[in-house]
Amino acid sequence: MNYKRIPWQQYFMMQALVIAQRSTCDRALVGSVLVKDARMIASGYNGSVHGQPHCDEVGHQIVDGHCVRTIHSEMNALLQCASNGIFTQDTEIYVTHFPCYNCSKALAQAGVAKVNYFYDYRVDPLAKELFEKVGVEVNKITIDPHYLENLLAEISED
């Protein structure tokens, strides 16, 4: 077998894709992983405020074409850090979908230095412009199918 170890960027993006499967709003299954020094420090997915009903339980709460019941995955990851006293300065985030403008502002304000995303989902020109102006690096990550094949081969052997 020709095994090669998965690169960090693809590893963290695959984590975000798995975490997205916990999302409770099916309008967009989004997952995020905050990383510092090649270590995951927080994760998040789209979901409702703790103790409140989720979209998959009671339906969407739509305002101006957006579901406002959920907290976005990026915000949940940042809030997890805030509630645990974890600094986010000079971190990077791996997020399945390009961040919305509000999440982009929060990421920049929190000191996130790099945004890595998988899907070009509603890429907001204001978010892109903000990242450029404040010096946040933005990268689109692709995953080599070889790693998915390895994963599926391992699963099918069990």
Image (cartoon, rainbow, N blue to C red):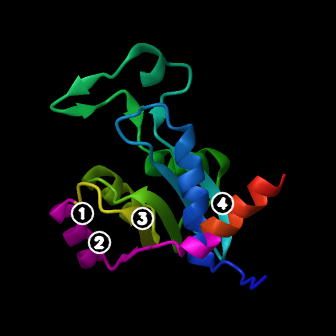
**Of all residues shown, which one is farthest toward the right?**
158
144 part of magenta stretch? yes
Q: Earlier in the sequence, mark 2 or mark 4?
A: 4
Task: Report the magenta residues as a range.
Answer: 124-147
Tell me the residue that label 2 is attached to. Answer: 131
Residue type, numbered disc 2: Phe
Q: Pointers 2 and 4 in contact (CB under 8 A)?
A: no
Rendering quarter of residue 146: bottom right
Tell whether 125 sits left or right of 112. Answer: left
Alpha carbon distance from label 3 to label 4: 20 Å
Tell me the residue that label 4 is attached to. Answer: 41
Q: Pointers 3 and 4 in contact (CB under 8 A)?
A: no
Tell me the residue that label 1 is attached to. Answer: 127
Residue type, numbered disc 1: Ala
Rendering quarter of residue 157: bottom right
Q: Residue 110 in the image: x percent, y percent? A: 45, 61
Alpha carbon distance from label 2 to label 3: 17 Å
Alpha carbon distance from label 2 to label 4: 22 Å
Residue 152 in view, yes or no: yes
